[in-house]
Amino acid sequence: MTKNIFVGLFFALFTMNALAQEKFTLSGTVTDVESNETLIGVNLLFPEISNGVATNSYGFYSITLPAGTYQLRLSYLGYEDRLETIVLDSSIRRNFAMKPSSESLDEIVLEEKVEKVSIRKPQMSVNALSAESIKRIPVVLGEADVIKAILLLPGVTSAGEGASGFNVRGGAADQNLILLDEATIFNSSHLFGFFSVFNPDAIKDLKLYKGGIPARYGGRVSSVLDIYQKEGNSKKLKVNGGIGAVASRLLVEGPIKKDVGAFLIGGRASYAHLFLPLFDIDSKAYFYDLNTKLNYKLNENNNLYLSGYFGRDLFSIEDSFENIYGNAVLNLRWNHLFSDKLFSNASLIYSDYYYGLGLDFVGFNWNSGISNINLKYDFTYYLNDAVKVYTGINNLYYTFNPGKIEPDGPDSGIVEEQLTRKYANEFAAYVDVEHKLTENLSMEYGLRWSNFTRLGQDEVNVYRNDQPVTFDPFLLIYQSAEPTNVDTSFSRSDKLATFNSFEPRLSASYAFNDDTSVKASYTRLVQYLHLLSNTSSPTPLDVWTPSGQFAAPQVLDQYAVGFFKNFRFRESEYTIETEAFYKDIDGRIDYIDGAQLIANDAIEQVILQGEARAYGLEFFLRKNEGKFTGFLSYTLSKSEQRTPGRNENEIGINRGEWYNTPYDKTHDISMNLNYELNDQWRFGSNLLFQTGQPTNFPVGQFEFQGIVIPTYGPRNKQRLPDYHRLDLSATLTPKANRGRKWQSEWVFSVYNVYNRRNAASINFRQNDQTFRNEAVRTSIFGIIPSVTYNFKF
């Protein structure tokens, strides 16, 4: 009997091995024929067997199929389809170069075209935008902007005009992981939110993950914005740029060694402040940034990349106030191909965010910031045509500088003080599997394990009963506790607190056919960093702080289901995407009444932790083809927060009741329409509507010793007026472009066409003449026309 079992097992293994020998691997890279730039997300499809693969973030692909002869179709938006006959009688390495479909300056693109293979993929809650689409969207002051573009997508909102950051599915701005070439960007805004830090000329690929987030990402609980810069043209020197009303940009790329290495360097700068002296205004407000990238192909299996970004903002008022802030990142990467099935990427990354403040009228300078060093190693294993495995590790070492005060001169009465620096280490390991179970059913499942250690620091406050916040049962208020001791015995290697988390991820897709599918996902994410901000939109002055003895990490569980369909109507292709989601977050911090956050060396004395939840329905309709294209997005959602008492004797914040978060928007509607009249003229428009932002208005008042004191009701009970506006743009491509190396275009745009005075805030005051209370609306933008000249050669 035992012998028969062994014989059976041997026969089965032999049969499997024989079958495996009948399968071979096709692998390689896909590039742009003109620049040799690798292309991300190119679909390589085998129509006869309804199978295919897409290139990864470095243009590499691999697929294993039974021996045979196949028709291969390469498809990528903005490029001509390519058909190839592949004879697969052995494993082969085949590189492909694709030709752009148009010689115009830029292609009108709303989003990555949903190929039929995408219907079958389990990935959901993901939006992609090209640099060209971003440039075509009308924006304030005519400067193309990444953040303003993604605000048109379902589930994405902002705190208002001029507000920095963005909110995804009812989450806070600090809950978004923003990556530029894998490096963390801690502040994505220039000029306090008027522009983003991303130069659209340097962007190669952009994806926003709102749910169903793969296990290779972690560290934030709301979304991941993953941006890759271009690699540079390794065939010839190319220059492009633009001149706008308030800012200009220039990007140069070319070969280091033809077809082997390339460089890219791009810069932007604003100059509106140069005109302020004409109006007798002694103030400044400007930004500049620099993007750079080098790549070099050592051989067929090894590539090196060095990419960086540096940006700074400066804002000053006469000689009394100066504010400088910005990001700096650097990433050294090594791609290695172990075999035709195993691809690896090793990265050493440095990220830094700096904030500096000079207050001459009080005689001191303030410096703060956060930095990290990240070492990561990722692998992609193409097991077979049905299974792809991602795995890797990464380790981040954080340094937090909550603030240092320095006298600005010998006459200053300020004493130098360094707030206690904080240190932490975050390690993570993950495995993620894309698995095609049947012709119709596909899954992506994975697990991420993260470890966060709060390391020793110079001083640690000690509190009675480990409670840095106390509750007064008579006044019914929370108050900061006084430390009973300050412990200075810790070394940097000591562990003040340790957290371990398992983060499972699961997504599934069932395709009824090539055009219709339903998808579902579950995502758990853990965030170990907290942004200390009691405003609706983050400001540069806000400070990051790590989880530790008095602040647990934030933990998210998100569930989503969706229906996706491609269909044709009147000879045009349309796409419908609908998703419902529910998010539950534990560990969300809130602040006691009267909390002081700036220059607070004991921030644990003013924060409490509670929970948050958000749920909603997203609808996205897009027209993909023809002279007239565009999309309509609508989100119906709710975002709430609650901080109950820590025991039965406490009332909590807002008496422990749920209240609206500052980023709760019941209705959010965006419509983007584009029309190509002819080879010279193209037109675009945006129409936006959002429910007003939650806020607090006085509900009453009383007089005390001749002073009128307003009283307020529950948190965020009132709202600002609803927000809406219309933007228009027209793009003129001169006839003179034809046959010339110098290519150019003029972009005319009007922001807020009907001059809607949307409220950034509403303040209350007593009228000096009538002595009656009145509400005063503050608006940032009215109607703004602008002109931008773009060129390349």
Image: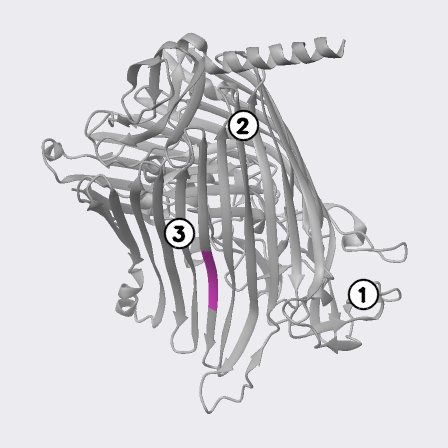
**Quadrant showing the N terminus:** top right
Q: Residues within 10 Å of mark 2 (few under 14, many from 20)?
A: many
- In front: 669, or 193? 193
Amino acid at the residue labelled 1? Gln
Residue identified by numbered label 2: 123
- In front: 286, or 712? 286
Which residue sits at x=30%, y=57%?
269
Q: Residues within 10 Å of mark 3 (few under 14, many from 20)?
A: some
Proximity of marks 1 and 3: CB atoms separated by less than 8 Å: no
Q: Is residue 108 visible?
A: no
Q: Which residues are magenta?
A: 350-355
Question: Does the stretch in magenta take in 507?
Answer: no
How far apart in space, not on screen, are marks 3 and 2 (Cα)? 29 Å
Amino acid at the residue labelled 3? Leu
Residue identified by numbered label 3: 332
Residue 654: % across, % down: 76, 53
The kind of secondary structure element at disc 1 is loop
How far apart in space, not on screen, are marks 1 and 3 (Cα)? 44 Å
Residue 507: % across, % down: 60, 27
Left or right: 141 with respect to 368? left
